[in-house]
Image: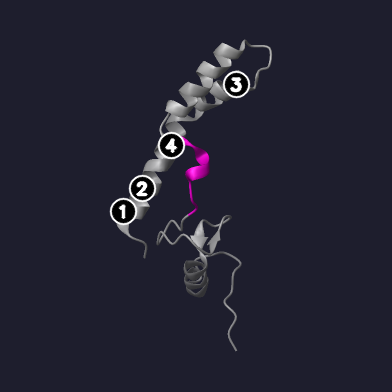
Amino acid sequence: MAKKAMIEREKKRQRLVAKYAEKRAALKEIIKDESKPMEERFRASLKLAGLPRNSSPTRLHNRCQLTGRPHAYYRKLKVSRIMLRELGSQGQIPGMVKSSW
């Protein structure tokens, strides 16, 4: 089980990414637009740099939704390999059977 603080920090990052997504996209469009004057593009880049760092989607890290484990994460199911095995053994995941011999 991951530390509660790490799980909460990741949730906070997800909220910030969602909150600033439109604003970041608009500023990036201004920066990329070659037809706009250089001063306006520079001002947009300063505004983008002024936004919270945790509002950037690249700072998000995939974590298991059940345990918070950051490694061995299956994107499709949003769980770690350990929880995948446990849930498969319990019959919680449709179509998955744990192999044993």
Which residue lies under the disc numbered 1? 5
Amino acid type, residue under disc 3 in the picture? Ile
Q: Residue at x 38, y 45 (%)?
A: 11
Residue at 48% over, 22% down: 46
Mark 3, Cα crowd under 10 Å, few <14 / some 14-19 / many 20+, is many
- Residue 18: x %, y % from top left: 46, 34
Is 81 placed left or right of 3 in the picture?
right
Crowd around label 2: few <14 · some 14–19 · many ≥20 (10 Å):
few
SS state under label 3:
helix
Q: Earlier in the sequence, mark 3 or mark 2?
A: 2
Question: What residue is shown with label 3?
Answer: 31
On the image, numbered disc 4 is attached to which residue? 53
Which callout, 3 or 1, points at the residue further toward the start of the chain?
1
Say left or right for 92 vs 41: left
How far apart marks 2 and 4 lie (CA) works out to 13 Å
Number of marks in picture: 4
For marks 3 and 4, the one nearer the N-term is 3
Q: Is residue 99 magenta?
A: no
Q: Which residues are magenta?
A: 54-62
Whole-angstrom CA distance, mark 3 to mark 1, is 35 Å
Which residue is disc 2 drawn over?
9
Do the numbered discs 1 and 2 sit on residues whose CB atoms are within 8 Å? yes
User: In the image, is residue 69 above or below residue 47?
Assistant: below
The kind of residue on which mark 2 rests is: Arg
Nearer to us: label 3 or label 1 = 3
Q: Nearer the viewer, residue 49 or 96?
A: 49
**Is label 3 in contact with label 4 (beta carbons under 8 Å)?**
no
